[in-house]
């Protein structure tokens, strides 16, 4: 019976975590426009349009989003530690989750 109770408590914790960590893809888009667009092409609809900003050194965000090796966990790791030449963006956990939600939305 002890294990059953433990599982119940765990489930409750996950339910709470789910609510508090609800990521916002729209917020992620504005973060990306502000903080990533200087180097990454962010637009999903016109992924290869030269009208959008970005440099050739950085892959477009939509190509990152579509890469099956770039899982949300991988992205979280990437964004939570500095990766020269990418600057340390110092995103909060919530901002990171928002950006990841935005990327997830692009890959569909
Ligand atoms: C100052 C320029 C710059 C900014 C700003 C920047 N990046 Fe990057 N980013 C790069 C470069 C250059 C690379 C390629 C690094 C490499 O290949 O080693 C990169 C690589 C990445 C990668 C890994 C791509 C892969 O598949 O290997 C991810 C994910 C990424 N950036 C996400 C972001 C996000 C999200 C933001 C905004 C929050 C951002 N970057 C802001 C320059 C930048």
Image (cartoon, rainbow, N blue to C red):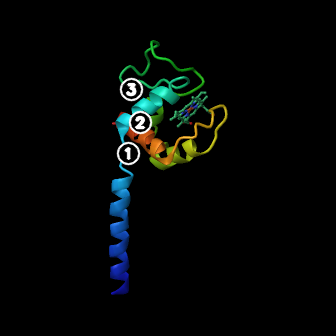
99 vs 78, left or right, is left
In the image, farthest residue toward the right: 84
* Badge number at residue 106: none
Residue 67 in view here: yes
> Closer to us: mark 2 or mark 3?
2
Q: Earlier in the sequence, mark 2 or mark 1?
A: 1
Q: Secondary structure at mark 3?
A: loop
Residue at horizontal 60 percent and vertical 24 percent from the top: 57
Q: Do the CB atoms of the residues marked 2 and 3 lie less than 8 Å apart?
A: no
Residue 37, percent from left and from top = 50, 24
Quarter location, residue 58? top right
Residue matched to label 2: 28
* Badge number at residue 44: 3
Q: Earlier in the sequence, mark 2 or mark 3?
A: 2
State which image quarter holds ligand 1: top right
Q: Do the CB atoms of the residues marked 3 and 1 lie less than 8 Å apart?
A: no
Residue matched to label 1: 23
24 vs 88, left or right, is left
| Disc 3 packing (10 Å; few <14; some 14–19; many ≥20) | some
Question: In the displayed structure, would residue 3 be above or below residue 20?
Answer: below
Q: Do the CB atoms of the residues marked 2 and 1 lie less than 8 Å apart?
A: yes
> Closer to us: mark 3 or mark 1?
1
What whole-number distance in Å separates the C-alpha atoms at marks 2 and 1?
8 Å
| Disc 1 packing (10 Å; few <14; some 14–19; many ≥20) | many
């Amino acid at each position: 019976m002890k294990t059953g109770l433990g599982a119940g408590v765990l489930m409750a914790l996950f339910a709470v975590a789910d609510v508090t960590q609800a990521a916002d893809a729209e917020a992620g888009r504005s973060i990306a426009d502000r903080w990533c667009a200087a180097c990454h092409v962010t637009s999903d609809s016109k992924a290869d349009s030269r009208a959008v900003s970005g440099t050739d050194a950085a892959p477009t965000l939509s190509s990152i989003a579509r890469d099956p090796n770039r899982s949300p966990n991988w992205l979280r790791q990437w964004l939570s530690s500095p990766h020269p030449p990418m600057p340390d963006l110092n995103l909060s956990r919530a901002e990171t989750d928002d950006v990841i939600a935005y990327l997830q939305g692009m890959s569909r």
